[in-house]
Amino acid sequence: MTCTLGEVKNRADFMIYWGGNPAECHPRHFTKYSLTQKGKFTPKGRKDRTMVLVDIRETPSAKAADVFLQVRPGKDFELVTALRAIVKGQRVNEAAVAETGLPLEKLHELVAMMKAARFGIIFFGMGLSMTRGKHMNSAAVLMLAAEMNAFTKFVAMPMRGHGNVTGADVVMRYTTGYPFGVNLCRGYPRFNPGEFSTVDLLVRGDNDACLVLGADPGATMPQPAINHLARIPTITLDPKVTHTSRLSRVHITTAVTGVSAPGTAYRMDEIPLPLRPALKSPYPTDEEVVRRIREAVMRRPAWLPERNAEMVV
Amino acid sequence: MPLTIVKNATCTFCGCVCDDIELHADGIRITETKRACSLGESWFKNHTAEHLYPDALIDGHPATVDDAVEAAADYLLNADMPLVYGMSNITCEAQREAVSLAELVGAVVDSHTSL
Ligand code: SF4
């Protein structure tokens, strides 16, 4: 269950930021969408809202929070599960709660605040979804928000980083039916995270060519994955010559999205926004280059039967 | 170069995708970024319209875009299981093209979300 940032601005009187540091990673999130804006049902802005920050250490975002809860690293799932139990009025084991690094009273206080809210939201970041438990953590937070709806309006929203990564999810969803890690080798989409996700594929050495767009895995991926990218023909499209370009067989320089390339990008709440570039690039856009590669592929003879004639019985 | 002013420009540096930014540009570089935060400001100011990099590289040597496109098409078509990866710093239009290319060559297509 989620909503748009416009609804947050106008309605949310209670918000939890979990496993994220918006003050440094999404600097305008507080001021433009969530915390300090004056909205229709939150006319006093910051004064009408309560903000709780849950993180493993005290980041600069803690200064903006009314309550800061420091959870032990890797104990997010346990904490969410305890909260879910308390929300439902079930008994929880005090010793198990102590392992999260927070006393039981704190959790009771938090649940009381959540239930007192008119419109609550949990923003969850990479500190939750990329650490121990991964997507199970995200699923638990979504369940917590869903279950809170027995008491008041409550939603959850992931804090996405990296420009248009939300757009990638949306586009893959409406073109293939799945949000990421989609295997089209058999001509129809198959989805299985862990099997068809990039790091797993590359570490296993499954791929025999790679096209990299708008990313620099050569700087960010685990070393065995990078080694495999260097072994196979890699093609990189990027506005700069990146680490990945240096290990690629082909690099094509492209215009910068939003600065010199027009198009659409999705905000983290899945609102599409038009880009208004201020410069004219000497390079083609990613869109144009990918289209030209596709057209070049289409000019080639079909994969079957000529090339693999010996395979056809 | 005359000053161009773009009102309500969109910053794509982080997931906030702020669309209320006023950009001043002199044709080569962006000189002012009103309402952008410090991250957005450095993102806009770091990218210019100069021709700083070769159009394309094949095996590390400068090449034309046409040759690079043909080479890319050959590699992708000849592979049994190519991978199309990234997709986060490109437009939705480019993402659609990428999915369509992936379908044509029978590839796995994946984004940062899977990390
Ligand atoms: S201006 Fe700042 S907060 Fe807004 S999208 Fe750009 S980097 Fe993010």
Image (cartoon, rainbow, N blue to C red):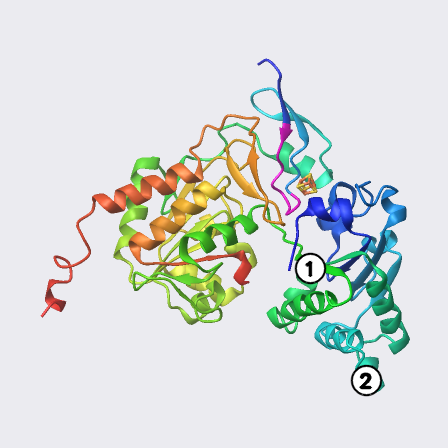
Q: Chain of mark 2?
A: A
Task: Please report the bounds of the magenta region as a residue range.
Answer: B8-16
Please provide percent x and percent y for residue A30. Answer: 78, 46
Which residue is drawn at the image coordinates 62% and 72% (left, top)? A136
Which residue is drawn at the image coordinates 85% and 84% (left, top)? A94
Up-down: is A92 above or below A243?
Answer: below
**Does residue A236 belong to the magenta stretch?**
no
Let me know if residue B68 appears in the view: no
Q: Any atom of ligand 1 within 8 Å of the CB at mark 1? A: no
Please provide percent x and percent y for residue A197. Answer: 47, 65
Q: Residues within 10 Å of mark 2 (few under 14, many from 20)?
A: few
Q: Is residue A258 left or right of residue B73?
A: right
Secondary structure of residue under mark 1: strand
Which residue is drawn at the image coordinates 64% and 46% (left, top)? B14
Q: Quadrant of the N terminus of chain A?
A: bottom right
Up-down: is B100 above or below B23?
Answer: below
The residue carrying mark 1 is A156
Q: Which mark is residue A91?
A: 2
Please provide percent x and percent y for residue A14. Answer: 81, 56
Query: Residue flagged by tag 2: what amino acid is it?
Result: Arg
